[in-house]
Structure formats: C-alpha cells, structure tokens
Image (cartoon, rainbow, N blue to C red):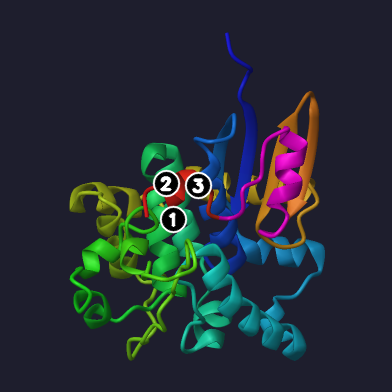
Amino acid sequence: MGPLLRTVELFYDVLSPYSWLGFEVLCRYQNIWNINLQLRPSLIGGIMKDSGNKPPGLLPRKGQYMANDIKLLRHHFQIPIQFPKDFFSVIIEKGSLSAMRFLTAVSLEHPEMLEKASRELWMRVWSRVSVGLWESSGRTFDDFLTFPRNVFRVMILPSPLPQRIYCPPVTPLSFDEDITQPQSILAAAEKAGMSAEQAQGLLEKISTPKVKNQLKETTEAACRYGAFGLPITVAHVDGQTHMIFGSDRMELLAFLLGEKWMGPVPPAVNARL
C-alpha cells in the first residue's frame, strides 16, 4: 500500500485573479503530488468584511502594483489572465455572489464538474480573448476554452532557447463578460460541458437555503483558518493543519508535503503543450 493521500483544500473566489493562479497550479500538480485536492468555493467579500481587509483595487498603490503584477504572472504561470476593461464595475460593484453560489451548487450536486465550471467563470472575468486571434492560428474559440491542456500549443514558438513560451498580446473584446446574470452563468456552465437542463437545474438551486448556508459555512471555515483574502490553501499533513495565503507560496506547500516543486508549469504539463 502506498502512502496515504494528504488533503489539500483550496478556498477561492472567481473575483480573485490570484485564486485563478493558485487553482491552475494545484490542478496541474494534483496528479503529480500525493494529494487529494478539494476545491472550496468561498466568498471573498465575506472574508474581507470579517478580517477588516480591503481589496487591492481600492488602494491606488496596491492597484497599480497588481496591474503590473498580473502582466508578469500571465507569462510566468502561462495563464491568459488580464484586467477587466471596467475593473471597478466588474470586480467591486457587481461582485460574485451569484457565481459563487452557483459553484457551491455544483460542488454539492456535481463535484466532478467543479474544476471546469470554476475555470469558465474565471475566463469570463479575467480573460477576454478575441475569437479572431485564435482562429487566425488555426484554432477555434472552443479550442481556447479547453485551457490549460491544449491552448499553449498555439503559444509555443520555435526558438534557439529551449522551452521558450510566448504569450501573445490579447486583444480585448469591446465589453467585459458578465458573471452576475443568469444567462451569463448558464453560458459558462455550458462551456464547461454541462447540458442546458443540468445548468438550469443548478442555477435554480442558488437561492435555496442549502446552497446559501453551504457557501456561508465554507467562507466561515476560511475565516477560522485565518483568511484575510483569497486564495488560501490549507494542507493537512501528519495531523497538523497549515494555512498558506496567496498563489506565490506553492514552493512552501511542496516543502510541507515533502514533494518536489517544479515551477508553476511542471514537466508533466509541458509534455502536453
């Protein structure tokens, strides 16, 4: 019998770009490391309120740093992430309550769909990609939405330097894709592979006490672990619990797990690019 799987929980909200980065890294490593990855949809607004923290976009210096940071992390993590055109409206005013309730319903009813559904909602908020850009490379927009398994085949260019990855500039659409309206959530769900009937059934559950209470309980659990923002990764190792904040401490997570850190895009993923 091999070593027991260690449980790793990721608490996240699709409003958080750093949550997307941590999410993709853990999804890439879940079959490399000896872990049982559990995705925990949470509400970042509730965590901010409970901790007294503020979103970085409300603090000018943090906001400017974040904008520059995202540009660099896009290349480093090989994730097509960029700022919404109207950051304040999309992130601050509209929020993510409906989206996170929907993901909570997915986690309760169809947990096997949670990874794909979460990714599609991040794509709507944090990655506006011109259809023409990808079709001109011989791929369709649907091919792009299979990210991250296939998309980078169109991003690897011949180079005298090994493994040089090129992330082309992304031409924004003329609007920010929404995650608050029912039709927007249904569109993301169908892109994730759900049938229209399945997606509609889950959407109808977001106003039920069961789903509302579950999202509240998950958010409160993150607060009990000490969260003051998202993402947080909680590792349960040898009877101890370790909370790690952010997406840039995965090397520390590897250390705690006794696993090897091979960067945000491990060789097993590069082999599929």
Q: Nearer the viewer, mark 3 or mark 1?
A: 3
Whether residue 104 appears in this view of the structure is: yes
Q: Residue at x 47, y 61 (%)?
A: 163
As drawn, the label of residue 267 is 3
Structural distance between the alpha carbons of marks 3 and 1: 24 Å
136 and 197: which is toward the camera: 136
For label 2, count other residues whose C-alpha is less than 10 Å away and answer few (under 14), some (14-19) or many (20+): many
The segment highlighted magenta reads 246-264
> CB of mark 3 within 8 Å of CB of mark 2?
no
Q: Position of residue 187 (x, y in %)?
A: 27, 64
Is 75 in the magenta? no
* Residue 144 found in image quarter: bottom left
From what the image shows, is residue 4 above or below residue 232?
A: above
Residue at which label 1 appears: 118
Q: Position of residue 19 (x, y in %)?
A: 59, 60
As drawn, the label of residue 114 is 2
Q: Residue at x 73, y 90 (%)?
A: 60
Label 3 is placed on what type of residue? Pro
Badge 2 element: helix
> CB of mark 3 within 8 Å of CB of mark 1?
no
Structural distance between the alpha carbons of marks 3 and 2: 25 Å
Q: Position of residue 220 (x, y in %)?
A: 70, 49
Is 251 in the magenta? yes
107 sits left or right of 3 in the view = left
Structural distance between the alpha carbons of marks 2 and 1: 6 Å
Label 2 is placed on what type of residue? Leu
> CB of mark 2 within 8 Å of CB of mark 1?
yes
Badge 1 element: helix
Of the numbered discs 3 and 2, the one sitting upstream in the chain is 2
